[in-house]
Amino acid sequence: MKKNLNTVGRVIRIAAVVAIGALIYFEVLDGAFGIGLSVVAMLLTVTTIRGYCPIVALLQKKENKKDSDNWL
């Protein structure tokens, strides 16, 4: 499987996971919404570790292309 996330994309995902984790830890988010965001955080963590995101592949946006102006 070819990686389709670059370093910037990975850093943004990790920052989002840390922010979600902090909000849940300090009980700002709870209930069903907190559980839903926990699942999103887990998916972001897995895709960051693997370096491959199926949503990015589905949208055919390759973040790791060096000659592309569309890196997002």
Image (cartoon, rainbow, N blue to C red):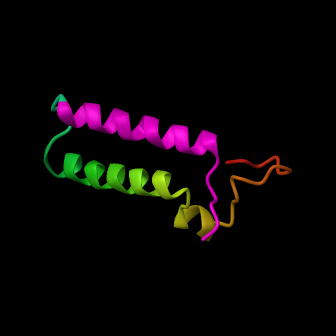
Seen at 64% across and 48% down, the residue is 6
Q: Which residue sits at x=37%, y=41%?
A: 17
Q: Could you tell me which quadrant the N terminus lies in? A: bottom right
Q: Is residue 13 magenta?
A: yes
Query: Residue at coordinates 82% horizontally, 46% vertically from top-left?
Result: 69
Relative placement, left or right, of 68 versus 25 is right
Residue 28 seen in the current view: no
Where does the image place residue 56, in percent across and percent down from the top left? 59, 61
Q: Position of residue 27 (x, y in %)?
A: 15, 32
Residue 36 visible in this rendered orientation of the protein? yes
Magenta portion: prevailing SS class: helix
Residue 34 part of the magenta segment: no
- Residues rendered magenta in the picture: 1-25
Residue furthest to the top in view is: 26
How many marks the image carries: the answer is 0
Query: Residue 43's spot in the image, x, y percent?
Result: 38, 57
Furthest residue to the right? 67
Q: Is residue 60 left or right of residue 21?
A: right
Q: Is the residue 5 above or below the residue 52 in the image?
A: above
Residue located 40% across and 50% down the image: 45
Residue 64, position in %: x, y?
71, 53
Rendered position, 54 above or below 48: below
